[in-house]
Amino acid sequence: MSTDQPTSADQPAGPARAPADDDYRGAGLQFPAGFVLGSATASYQVEGAAHEDGRGPSIWDTFSHTPGNVWNGDTGDVADDHYHRLDEDLDLMADLGLHAYRFSIAWPRIQPTGRGPANPAGLAFYSRLVDGLLERGIRPIATLYHWDLPQALEDEGGWTNRATAEAFAEYARLVGTELGDRVATWTTLNEPWCSAYLGYGSGAHAPGRTDPLAALTAVHHLNLAHGLAVQALRSVVTNDPDFSITLNLHVLRGEGEGAEEAVRQIDGIANRVFLQPLLEGGYPDDVLADTATITDWSFVRDGDAEIIRQPLDVLGVNYYSTTKVRLWDGVSPRQNADGHKDVGGSPWPGADRIEFLPQPGPHTDMGWNIEPAGLEELLVSLSRTHPELPLMVTENGAAFPDEVVADPSRPTGTAVHDDLRVDYLRRHVTACHRAVERGVDLRGYLVWSLLDNFEWGYGYAKRFGIVRVDYDTLERIPKDSAFWFAELARTGRIPE
């Protein structure tokens, strides 16, 4: 996604990549009317109540309870206790003036085993959540799948089993029947790249498998699940929602001799293996060739391409950092600085010739480089390739080690002066504004995350929230970044 592409009269002008010395620290820049500014969370990361009201176990319950998988042995059993503190958190969103809230629905709350009738208590929780948002003037954006697959389905093969995609469609139908008169945007999947490659390839995410064939099989069944779910939702919703999927597309930087080939191969396995079937139909020929020693892709059946390629109203884009690649010489120690937790497996099936290089700072607490130019570049590139498709930044944010200090002027008596996070958000929101100015049809920006939460394999060690959560007392403490973002949401203008 990092290479410049030819422009035409109806596409954004100028090169995709910004000058390297541009700091992106905008202020006073006004977004157009209707630009959505909100925040996002995920069910397993915030809800807790893991064993209550009929919820079944998910792969993340199993994974996090397996010693050695998550830092400090942390689990999502309690998380932020959002399940019991829903009204408090809804009021917090209203106080911050959020236009929208992107939440995910826990499949095991709706169907404890991934099949069968809907659990009334699970539906009731999300119905109350959606109603609470609407009562406060906040737009509900519902994600059907943010990685918490029912464990019973994983026991049958998980995303390597085509039946899981078919079960997902039935789950979508159940949820759509209950909430399909009120949800403004339906997002089928969050970051299927992570579900497939980190879950079944590298082993860093649940279910913790390290099988390249399983990872590629999961890619297809996730794509298929998206298409089936959109069809199911369209058959039952009664309002006029947007249909979407959220992808974590990789912005690639090539280095050294063969840089173009290194970028091509990783762009194929990371980006085009999702974008092409979703938006154009079928899988890229070069990806099939690159992975031919792993699979013949016979799990793709006649008619699947048509199911996957459903019309979308908006494409969700998650962005945090860039990725630097080069062809490995096969002799020197192979570098693997791809930004993901390394537990031994590879999230890059078929890419054995590629190595991932460290990038210069500054970095977040995750070790990810901070490059707002990459976000502008990604949005402009997508707009050039698919000018008819509106975009929304559905996740962007940063983990930093926050410090709580006494501040009697604040309601909580404490404050978190997270200047680094404010600066990160300012620079990336500026990148969004520049993309809009260049003609990109960008509909909104959702900060990750509303709350500090369970950060997957890193447990509670990494804090992304604009609101701090004290994991001992579960008290919510808005950080300076929350007040900064509230001003942005109130005015639509990047604060001075």
Image (cartoon, rainbow, N blue to C red):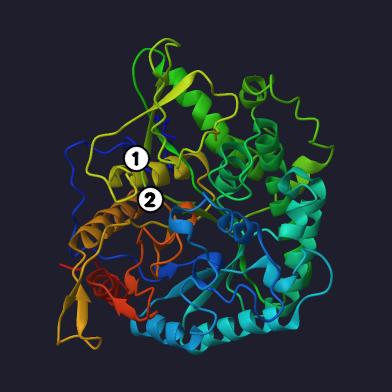
Specify which label sits upstream in the sequence, 2 or 1. 1
Disc 2 residue type? Gly
In the displayed structure, 143 sits above or below 166; it is below
Q: Which residue is mark 2?
A: 439
State the CA–CA distance, disc 2 to disc 1.
8 Å
Q: Which residue is mark 1?
A: 13
Indicate the position of residue 455 as horizontal and vertical percent values. Answer: 45, 58
Indicate the position of residue 85 as horizontal and vertical percent values. Answer: 48, 84
Q: Is residue 266 left or right of residue 162?
A: left
Nearest to the observer: residue 479 or residue 73: 73
Displayed quadrant of residue 193? top right
Q: Which mark is residue 298?
A: none
On-image quarter of the C terminus: bottom left
Nearest to the observer: residue 369 or residue 310: 369
Disc 1 residue type? Ala
Indicate the position of residue 190 as horizontal and vertical percent values. Answer: 56, 55
Identify the residue at horizontal 46%, vertical 87% (top origin): 136
In the displayed structure, 349 sits above or below 366; it is above
- Label 2 Cα crowd, 10 Å radius (few <14 / some 14-19 / many 20+): some
In the displayed structure, 181 sits above or below 264; it is below
Displayed quadrant of residue 201? top right
**Marks 2 and 1 close (CB-CB < 8 Å):** yes
Q: Looking at this view, name the residue that lies furthest to the front.
A: 67
Identify the residue at horizontal 18%, vertical 46% (top origin): 23
On-image quarter of the N terminus: top left
Identify the residue at horizontal 40%, vertical 40% (top origin): 339
In the displayed structure, 119 sits above or below 205; it is below
Indicate the position of residue 97 as horizontal and vertical percent values. Answer: 35, 80
Element under disc 2? loop
Q: Is residue 12 left or right of residue 243?
A: left
Q: Is residue 320 left or right of residue 54?
A: left
